[in-house]
Image (tube, helix red, strand yellow):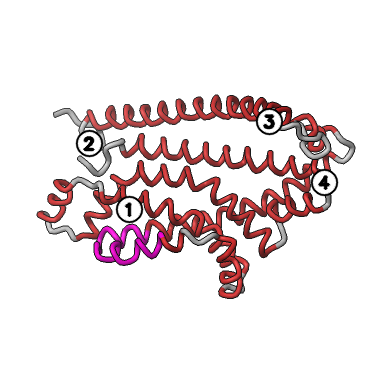
Amino acid sequence: MATTTTGAPAGTEVHENRSNASVASAVGKRIGISVLTLVISAVVLVIAWYALLRILAIDEFVGKRPLDVYQWLFADDKAAANRSDMWGWLKVTLTDSITGFLAGVVGAIVVASLFTVIRPLEFVFMPLAMMLRSVPLVAMAPIIGMTFHSELLRAATIGGVVVFFPVLVNAAIGLRSASPQAIDVIRVNGGTKWTALRLVAVPTALPNLFAAIRISVPGAVIGAMLYEWLFSGTGLGSEIFRANANVQYNKLWSIVVVVTFTSILLYTVVSIVETLVLAKWGPNAGRR
C-alpha cells in the first residue's frame, strides 16, 4: 500500500479531507438555515405582535408597537443611553443565565450517568426528582434564599433547577438507548461500566442531549430573570418589573423584545454547535 511521507496510509489524508469538508458543509448549511429562520421568526413575530394588539384592542399607551420599541432603542433623543443601559442589563442577565445553565446541564449529566451505571439509583431518585419538579419555583425561592447566602449559588440554583429536569430526563433516555451489542464488545475486551458509558452511551445520547439543551436555553434565561427579580435586583429581570411599576411601557416592551431575540439567538447557537458535533461524530455515534 502506498504511504505518505509520514508513514500514514495515503487514503487517510483523503478521508480526513472529505470528513472535514462534510463537517464544514453541514455547519455552513445549518448557519444558512439558522439565519433564514431568524429572519422568518422576526417577520412572524412582528406580524403576530400587530395582529394581537389589534384583535385584543389593547390601548396604545399600554400595548406598544414595534415602531415604539424601535424609537426607544434607536430614534429617541435618549436612544443611545437606552441602548447602553439595555446592554448593561443584558450582560448581567447573560452571566446569570450561563451560571444557571452550566449548573443545570452538568448536574443533570452527572446524575443521568449515575442512573445509567447504577440502575437502582434511578428507581429510587427519579420519582423524587419529578416530585420536586412539580413544586413551583417561586414557592421554592424563599428556601433557596435562606439556604444559600452567596449570590452565585442562588443564581446557579434558580437557573439550574429550570434546566436540570428536562436535561436529566432526555439524557437518561439517550444513555439507556446505547446499543447492547456495543456495550458487550466493551465488556468482552475488559472494559468497565464507566468505559462503556464513555465510549458507547455518551456518544449515543448526544442527539437527545442536544435536544434537551436547545429546549433549556430559553428556560435558563427565564430562570436568570426570576433570580434577578427575587434576589439580586439587577439585570433584565429586575428592570422589567421596575419598568412595569413605573409605567415605563416603552422600556418594558423593549426588554421583552431583547429577551425574545436573545433566546432565539442562543437557541440558534446551540443548534450550530449540535450540527458541528454530530457531523464530526456521526448521527450513529456509539452504535457502531
Between marks 2 and 1 in the image, the one whose residue lies nearer the viewer: 1
Residue 8's disc number: 2
Name which of mark 3 and mark 4 comes first in the sequence. 3
Height in image: 286 above or below 31?
below
Q: Residue at x 63, y 30 (%)?
A: 45
Name which of mark 3 and mark 1 comes first in the sequence. 3
* Closest to the observer, 120 or 77: 120
**Amino acid residing under circle 1:** Ala
Image marks 2 and 4: residues in contact by CB distance under 8 Å: no
Q: Residue at x 54, y 49 (%)?
A: 219
Q: Within the image, what quadrant is residue 276 found in? A: top left
Per the image, label 3 sits on a secondary structure element best described as helix
Q: Residue at x 37, y 60 (%)?
A: 110
Between marks 4 and 1 in the image, the one whose residue lies nearer the viewer: 4
Q: CA distance from mark 3 to mark 1?
A: 40 Å
Name which of mark 2 and mark 4 comes first in the sequence. 2
**Label 1 sits on residue:** 172
Q: CA distance from mark 2 to mark 4?
A: 67 Å
**Farthest-out residue, left:** 188
Q: Residues within 10 Å of mark 2 (few under 14, many from 20)?
A: few
Q: CA distance from mark 2 to mark 1?
A: 39 Å
**Label 4 sits on residue:** 248
**Amino acid residing under circle 3:** Leu
Q: Does the stretch in magenta take in 124?
A: yes
Between marks 2 and 4 in the image, the one whose residue lies nearer the viewer: 4
